[in-house]
Amino acid sequence: MIRTRVGYAGGKKENPTYHQLGDHTETLEVDYDPAHISYEKLLELFWEEHNPTSSSWSTQYKAAVFYHDDEQKRQALATRDRLAARLGKTIRTEVVPFSRFYPAEAYHQKYYLRGNKQFLKELQRYYPQDEGLMNSTAAARVNGYLGRNGTADSLKAEIEGYGLSESSRQALLHAAGVKR
């Protein structure tokens, strides 16, 4: 994945915020390179990472796939239907058309990164504005590895490109559980 942002989508309210959400749903926006991962593979990961058979108790927290075009809709419905057949259960995750994404407030972005001041301070040297940090591929990758996502081999292969000091690179390898 190139970068991720948390925010709000699916509703009619203009410029929602966490405390004035209106009819939006909290969402994760993913920018990805289809040369490295397919949309269908992203969908498979999405279906694996939550319980799609649970009913949502509010619009704010409902599970949804927001598709951008007919092909994405087709793939989302196909993967949903395959999962339903495999589980023998009704899938309650919604598949809905995308209209607009509103980024969440800065303090909601990069949760794991914000919890680790060493990495946050280093990346803020390159991205002193919240919007830059939110849109940074390096920040998204560090955040992901701090959340124990990704493989040791991937981290080792790309860590040099994050702009971190040697001590922070070693600390990230350790925090991500990479054995030397």
Image (cartoon, grey):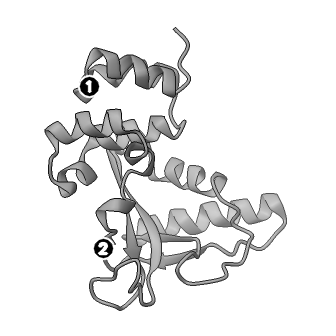
Which amino acid type corresponds to the residue marked 2 in the rendered image? Answer: Tyr
Q: Give left or right: position of 148 versus 20.
A: right
Q: Which residue is denoted by mark 1 in the rendering?
A: 164
Distance CA(mark 1)–CA(mark 2) = 29 Å
Please give the name of the residue rendered at 38% of the width and 36% of the height, measured from the top-left corner: 142
Q: How many labels does the image show?
A: 2
- The x and y percentages for residue 40 are 51, 52
Q: Where is residue 99 in the image (x, y as percent from the top left)?
A: 34, 80
Amino acid type at circle 1 is: Leu
Residue 137: image quadrant is: top left
* Identity of the residue furthest to the front in this view: 117
**In the rendered image, the vertical position of residue 102 relative to residue 141, given as above or below:** below
Could you tell me residue 17's position as x and y percent?
A: 35, 79
The reply to whether discs 1 and 2 touch (Cβ–Cβ < 8 Å) is: no
Give the mark nearer the N terminus: 1 vs 2.
Answer: 2
Question: Helix, strand, or loop for circle 2?
Answer: strand
Where does residue 121 sit, x and y in percent of width and height? 26, 38
* Mark 1 or mark 2, whichever is nearer to me: 1
Frontmost residue, 85 versus 116: 116
Please give the name of the residue rendered at 18% of the width and 51% of the height, measured from the top-left corner. 132
Compared to 114, does 138 lie above or below? above
Q: Mark 2 points at which residue?
A: 102
Q: Quadrant of residue 79?
A: bottom right
